[in-house]
Image (spheres, coloured by chain):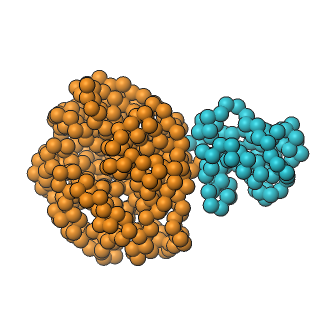
Chain colours: A orange, B cyan
Amino acid sequence: MSGVRVLVGTRKGAFILTADAKRDRWDIDGPHFAGWEIYHLKGSQADPDRLYASQSSAWFGQVIQRSNDGGKTWEPAGNQFVYDGVPGSHQWYDGTQHPWEFKRVWHLEPSLTDPDTVYAGVEDAALFRSIDGGQTWLELPGLRGHGSGPSWQPGAGGMCLHTIVLDPSDPGRIFIAISAAGVFRTDDAGRTWRPANRGLHSQGIPDPAAEVGHCVHHMAMHPSRPAVLFMQKHWDVMRSDDAGGSWHEVSGNLPTDFGFAIDVHAHEPNTIYVVPIKSDSEHYPPDGRLRVYRSRTGGHEWEALTNGLPQANCYVNVLRDAMAVDSLHPCGLYFGTTGGQVYASADAGDSWAPVVRDLPAVLSVEVQTLP
Amino acid sequence: MIRVVLPAHLRTLAQVNGEVALHVEGQVTQRSVLDALEARYPMLRGTIRDHATRQRRAFVRFFACSRDLSHELPDASLPEAVATGAEPFLIVGAMAGG
């Protein structure tokens, strides 16, 4: 019987939530790696039992964990992330130059076709790849070598490469996003990169329409339409119809166009979801009401989804990697909060229920749809 | 044998209980003890010392015989009581909350 496996990374460990296709009764397994920050964990599409997890702490640094049995057992993999050549420097918060220093892995993106190949987006921003199941990691240095690196600067969370989107129709094409540099695209499997930020407009940088320097929070793509990208930027929800060649705003009637998470319905490429968040710096839902917004028109026109979500006194955040969809029918939608709740909807967002309420702050949520 | 006490999180990572006993060739120093530890437990590489520089991570401390040895030179001899196994070499996570 089909079902789902929800992989939850938190400030103090990882949790694995499983349910059958009804998605109304859940088993909760964890914490794995108790006490460590789990920025992200994700399963391979090529082998759903192969999972990767990014485990880190201020005390003991970065560890990569790998599972070959769907998260029942784990083994440490390689944790040596060495920048290619002389790392150089990037812009610090005050505009001075600051040396590039590895801090942690924010995002792990397994290859769509090979369970042993996995990409790692790291802080300070760079993209690494392993082709041996996470044992060894090599940087794809063309990204930092693009030439704009000295102008990249950290966002509030650090200077992180947090989003990796693989194009299922073209193995050479990868999109990545960095806070705060913006989107870059490669068409040659990571050898060379070019910025893909035309149309973005950001306050807080000297030239609001600069080629590089934008605080992109997250991107999402529907696999059937890889030239269409959706973006939640620091401010503005954006859309590209030409694989990042240009962007236009689709924030429409959202109560605020600030937020972190964005995702696409599994079966409706024009149905997208965001969680509007109040800013600057408050970073909780407007009016204390936790609302997912859905657009069935690829942006511009949004409806609030509130059934089952707290509509008073709610002051949590939903971070950039903390929303995901399954591919069951109807499409399931999941998100986690900094208050430790993981909410699930088995009807594409029409109604919600908490799977679990009291986890540590949720950093990431990924979903595997199991046969 | 050299006795090493790991912090709880590293014991979990290395899948060990209690103290670790290590055979160290030659002079007993921070470096030789940590080299032996990482050779026995490769998953600890990078968690105590930086992979490249081999410098102690900022939030890790080394204690032995009621002394803080964190800032001793890596190739300085450890106390005789550590070298004989009478006292353990303690690897400690800095007391920084969390």
Q: Is residue B38 above or below residue A165?
A: above
**Residue A73 percent across, percent down from the top left:** 48, 33
Q: Which corner quadrant holds the C terminus of chain A?
A: top left
Residue at 20 percent across and 68 percent down: it is A246
Q: Is residue B40 above or below residue A32?
A: below
**Residue B4 percent across, percent down from the top left:** 75, 40
Q: Is residue B83 left or right of residue A106?
A: right
Q: Nearer the viewer, residue A289 or A275?
A: A275
Asked if one can make out residue B11 in the rendered structure from this viewpoint, the answer is yes
Q: Is residue B47 above or below residue A305?
A: below
Q: Is residue B50 left or right of residue B80?
A: left
Residue at 21 percent across and 35 percent down: it is A328
- Quarter of the image for residue A299 reads bottom left
Q: Nearer the viewer, residue A228 or A9?
A: A228
**Residue A38 percent across, percent down from the top left:** 46, 43
- Quarter of the image for residue A336 reads top left
